Image (cartoon, helix red, strand yellow):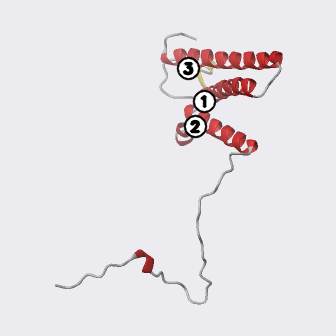
C-alpha cells in the first residue's frame, strides 16, 4: 500500500512571479463604532432606506422595467385596479408613503427620547402619529384599489 501524503494548508506555498514584490495582505472586517451618535443615525437611515426600497419592489422594477403610466379610457391613472403589474408611478408613490411612515415612527421615537419640554414633545409625538396614520391608511387604500375591492 502506498502511503498518502496529507497536504496541510499552513504549509501550502503559492507560486509568485519573480521580480514582483509579494504583497502581505491581511484582510479584516471593518469595525463600526456605534457609540458615536452620528454613526448610529447614518446606519439607521441607510437601513431604513434599504428596507423601504425592498418593500416597494425596487429590484423587480430594476430587473423588469415597468411602464411609467398606463392610460385607461384616455385618462392616466396612478393606481390601476385589477392589474398584476406595478407601474413606475405606483412604486414611487408607495416608496414615498413608506418613507413617510418611517419618518413618523422616527419622530415618535425621538420625541420620547430626546425632547424634555412637554409641549414640544406632544407636538412631535402628535406629528409622528399623524404621519404614520396617513401613510397606513393611504397604503391600505392603494392596496384595496389594486386588488379591486374599491373602484377608482
Label 1 to label 2, Cα distance in Å?
A: 8 Å
Is residue 92 visible from the viewing direction of this image? Answer: yes
Nearer-N-terminus badge (2/3): 2
Label 3 to label 1, Cα distance in Å?
A: 12 Å
Q: Mark 3 vs mark 1: give the one in front.
A: 1
Q: Residue 141: horizontal and vertical position, in percent?
A: 58, 14
Within 10 Å of disc 2 (Cα), the crowding (few <14, some 14-19, many 20+) is some
Locate residue 117: give its quadrant: top right
Q: Residue 55: horizontal and vertical position, in percent?
A: 56, 32
Residue at 70% across, 15% down = 130
On screen, residue 6 versus residue 120, left or right, reads: left
Residue on which the image places disc 1: 91
- The vertical placement of 133 against 36, above or below, is above
Q: Residue 20: horizontal and vertical position, in percent?
A: 61, 85
Locate residue 49: give its quadrant: top right
Query: Which residue is situated farthest in the front direction here?
Result: 116
Q: Residue 27: horizontal and vertical position, in percent?
A: 58, 66
Residue at 81% across, 23% down = 116
- The vertical placement of 98 against 63, above or below, is above
Q: Mark 2 vs mark 3: give the one in front.
A: 2
For the image shown, how many numbered marks are present on the structure? 3
Residue on which the image places disc 3: 80
Q: Secondary structure at mark 1?
A: helix
Label 2 to label 3, Cα distance in Å?
A: 18 Å
Q: Secondary structure at mark 2?
A: helix
Residue on which the image places disc 2: 58
Callout 1 touching callout 2 (CB < 8 Å):
yes
Amino acid at each position: 500500500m502506498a502511503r498518502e501524503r496529507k497536504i496541510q494548508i499552513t504549509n501550502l506555498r503559492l507560486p509568485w512571479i519573480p521580480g514582483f514584490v509579494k504583497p502581505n495582505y491581511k484582510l479584516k472586517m471593518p469595525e463600526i463604532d456605534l457609540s458615536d451618535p452620528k454613526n448610529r443615525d447614518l446606519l439607521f437611515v441607510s437601513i431604513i432606506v434599504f428596507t423601504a426600497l425592498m418593500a416597494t419592489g425596487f429590484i423587480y422594477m430594476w430587473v423588469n422595467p415597468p411602464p411609467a403610466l398606463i392610460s385607461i379610457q384616455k385618462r392616466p391613472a396612478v393606481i390601476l385596479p385589477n392589474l398584476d403589474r406595478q407601474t413606475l408611478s405606483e412604486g414611487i408613490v408607495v416608496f414615498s408613503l413608506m418613507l413617510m411612515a418611517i419618518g413618523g415612527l422616527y419622530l415618535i421615537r425621538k420625541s420620547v427620547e430626546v425632547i424634555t419640554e412637554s409641549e414640544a414633545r406632544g407636538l412631535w409625538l402628535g406629528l409622528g402619529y399623524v404621519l404614520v396614520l396617513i401613510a397606513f391608511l393611504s397604503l391600505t387604500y392603494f392596496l384595496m384599489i389594486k386588488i379591486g375591492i374599491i373602484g377608482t
